[in-house]
Each structure stands twice: as structure tokens, then as C-alpha cells.
Image (cartoon, grey):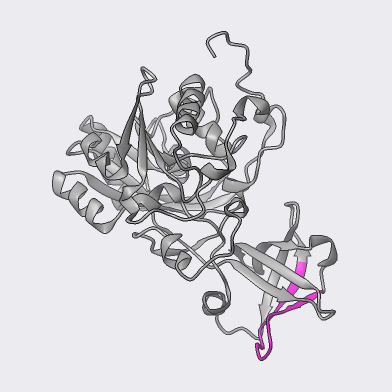
Amino acid sequence: MNDKSYDIYHLKSYDYYLPEDLIAKFPVEPRDASRLLVLDRRTGRVEDKIFRDIIEYLKPGDTLVVNKTRVIPARLHGYKESGGKVEILLLKKRDEGWEALVRPAKRLRPGETVFFGEGVKVTAEIVDVSEVEGGRIIRFNNCPDDYQFIEEMGEMPLPPYIRRSAEESDKRRYQTVYAQETGSAAAPTAGLHFTEKLLYDLQAKGVNIAGIVLHVGIGTFRPVTCENIREHKMHREWYRIDEETARLLNNTRQEGRSIVAVGTTVVRTLETVYNDDYGFRAESGETEKFIYPGYKFKAVDKLITNFHLPGSSLLMLVAAFAGYENTMAAYRYAVENRYRFFSYGDAMFIK
């Protein structure tokens, strides 16, 4: 693509050919046996590795930043009083209930009630229409504990491209080993490759492990539809960085070591909170940061990420970090060499 016959701001520039059989439907075991494509963003050179080889690329004093969010079994199946089937995908908790995507959206208007099975007293009331397409605000009734009900009745919200129903094993596998704080509607998938042993080995080498929280919602996985990607608006997602992590990241910078982000959610959080005057500091809030080529990174030095959908905001973030041509060439290489793609697929390390 050295002829520059593309436009980095045009949606079609982020399309690529992907055979259906390269979309991973199940994860590999153990987690760190996934393949790892290492990309040098300065030279464009790629290497084929196994994920556990990541330890070779991190140095003592580097800080690995992970997203400690925990995925809730956010997909609920119910029915209307008429008997029509209903699917609810919970996105995030709100004061008045939950923001959710519902199907069939056209038939679920405010005032409608969704039921959940014989003998189940809990119902969901459609309270309002939200600003996203297919979005509703719902409220659970006869429900002393929303989260307990969701854990009992919900299934893991596997992305639709996996094209299978969630299984019991997905409650463990579609979750990072360090997940702590409940609130995500999707997994921060780059972290799925880490085992407890690999994290232990990294710390034994002198690599710091720091945690942030960003609850993954529709902002991360909603497709970009604007032909000019600069017109795309991200949906807000809640994040938090604590004082201990902020201090560790500032120390890492002062010592000239690398900050290594595990996933695009970590990148967006760190780039949201970083300030030229004071570096990192503890804060929480909502981010709608959209990162695409031309963005100047300030907070992140290296990135671990999965292979993302064509035309997605995540692919655009990777292209911003690694360079557009490097990224698309690496994706073509990954396809040619039969890497596994998307949530349960293989990983990239961009250095």
C-alpha cells in the first residue's frame, strides 16, 4: 500500500478479507497457548510466537496494565405476555435501572413487561427508549438483588459472530483470570490469554502489574457506520484509575520504562486520564474517546491486543498505534498464516 491510494479516514480502508473458518468459535487451552503475532511498529517486521513468549518482550521495571472489569452474564431470554420471545442484552447499570439492547426492539415499547420463565417472579419493565438504536431502559421488578438474578438467569454475552450459544464453560473462559469488578457487557479480550502462572512469572521477572477498570459496553463493540470515520461518536463507558496505579505509572515513566497496555480498553482509559502537566492521577468518570490514525499517543508505549473486526473502532485504534500500513499488512499476514480472529482468537503484541 505504498502508493498511498487509500484514505485513512475512509471506512472502507479498514476492510480486509477474512475466511469464515478463521473466526475462533472456542478458545484454546491453556489460555497462554494462543499464537502471538509480534509487530515492530518502527520497521513493520513481524514474528510468529506463542502467547506465553510475551515474557521475552517485557523488561524489569516495565508496567503491564490490565482491565480488572468482570463480565456479567448479560444476555437474558424472556417472553412477552403474548408469548413472543424476547432477548435482552444488558449494557450498564443506571440509577433508574439498566441500559440494554432488546430484540425485537420495535415491539418492546415503554410500559411492556418481559417475563422470564415458569415460577420466576422477577419481571423486566420497559421504562424508556435510550439514545442507541435498539436500546431501552429496563427495570427489574420483584427483584431484591439484580446481580444475583442476572447470575442465575443470564448467559455470557458471546459476540454474534461466534455463531453458537453460550455454554457453561464460557462463564469461566469468557472472563480474565484477574477479573474483579462486575459491570461489563463484553470481555476485555486481550486479557483472556493470561494465566495466573504467566502473571506470576512476569512479576518474578520484575514486571509490575497494574489494574484499571473500564466497564465494556456498546461503545467498544458498536460498529462504525460513518464513511468518514472522524464523524463516528463513541458511546460513553465508565472507567476508574486509583492512586496506587497512577503513582506506579508515573514512576514507570520517570524511570524510562515502558507502559504496556493489555487491550484497547486500557489504552482508551490511560489516554483519557493522562495529562501533560501532571501525568497520571486517580480519577473516575465516563470516556467517549475515539482513537484513530493521526492520534498522538502520550500514555502507552506498547500494546497487547486481539485481531479485530473489519471497520471497527478497535481496528482503527490499532492502526493509530502501529501505523495504518503496518497494521493492514500484519492482518494480511495473519490471514495468510491462519491466525485465529476475534474474541476467542489469537493475539498481537505491538512494540
**Residue 274 sits inside the magenta stretch:** no
Q: What residue sits 85% from the left and 79% below the top?
A: 82
Residue at the farthest top position: 3
Q: What residue sits 18% from the left and 50% below the top?
A: 201
Residue at the farthest bottom position: 119
Taking the image as shown, residue 206 lies to the left or right of residue 76, namely: left
Q: Quadrant of the N terminus?
A: top right
Work out whether residue 279 can be spotted: no
Residue 99, quarter of picture:
bottom right
Q: Nearer the viewer, residue 1 or 134?
A: 1
Q: Position of residue 43 (x, y in %)?
A: 36, 17
Residue 77, quarter of picture:
bottom right
Image: magenta residue range: 112-127
Q: Nearer the viewer, residue 229 or 176?
A: 176
Q: Quadrant of the C terminus?
A: top left
Work out whether residue 27 can be spotted: yes
Q: Is residue 114 above or below residue 14?
A: below
Q: Position of residue 215 (x, y in %)?
A: 50, 56
Q: Is residue 312 above or below residue 192?
A: above
Residue 136, quarter of picture:
bottom right
Q: Is residue 141 above or below residue 238?
A: below
Q: Position of residue 185 (x, y in %)?
A: 55, 59
Q: Position of residue 273 (x, y in %)?
A: 44, 41
Q: Nearer the viewer, residue 245 or 18?
A: 18
Q: Nearer the viewer, residue 28 or 63?
A: 28
Total numbered circles:
0
